[in-house]
Amino acid sequence: MKLLQIALILIAVIALAVGDVFLKKAALESSLWRALKSPWMMGAIALYLYQIVFVTYFFIIGWDLSVVGTLQAAFYGLIVILAGIFYFEETLAPMQVMGIILAFSGVVLISAH
């Protein structure tokens, strides 16, 4: 996999992960209706649509689902884990840290073709 492909996948994943952060911010509202009307929700929807268009293009130009999907999952995991820790002050158990390490090891093996 070329560096450009990895960079483009990373951009799409950042849109998805930031969309999820926005979604969590919207969910902090006092009701579902207020969350749905929140500017955070609108931002999340816009970023989700951007990611869908980007990934659809990857498949149109012939990228493999197995590689794109695996890289997306790994990058997404890293971004939301970091956002959870640093932005929402969440913590990870040692077993979760081990799972993250194993997941990234798998990504390295899959994308080393």
Image: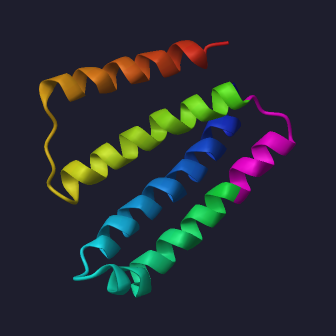
Q: Residue at 22%, 82% (x, y): give it.
A: 30
- The percent coordinates of residue 14 (x first, y second) are 50, 53
Q: Is 70 above or below relative to 61? A: above
Q: Tell me which segment is drawn in magenta.
A: 53-64
Q: Quadrant of residue 20?
A: bottom left
Q: Residue at 38%, 46% (x, y): give it.
A: 79
Q: Give the camera-side residue of 31 and 57.
A: 31
Q: Is residue 75 magenta?
A: no
Q: Quadrant of residue 26?
A: bottom left
Q: Is residue 60 left or right of residue 101?
A: right
**Quick one: which residue is furthest to the front in this view?**
32
Q: Main secondary structure of the magenta part?
A: helix
Q: Residue at 69%, 38% (x, y): give it.
A: 4
Q: Give the camera-side residue of 65 and 31.
A: 31
Q: Is residue 47 left or right of residue 75?
A: right
Q: Residue at 86%, 41% (x, y): give it.
A: 61
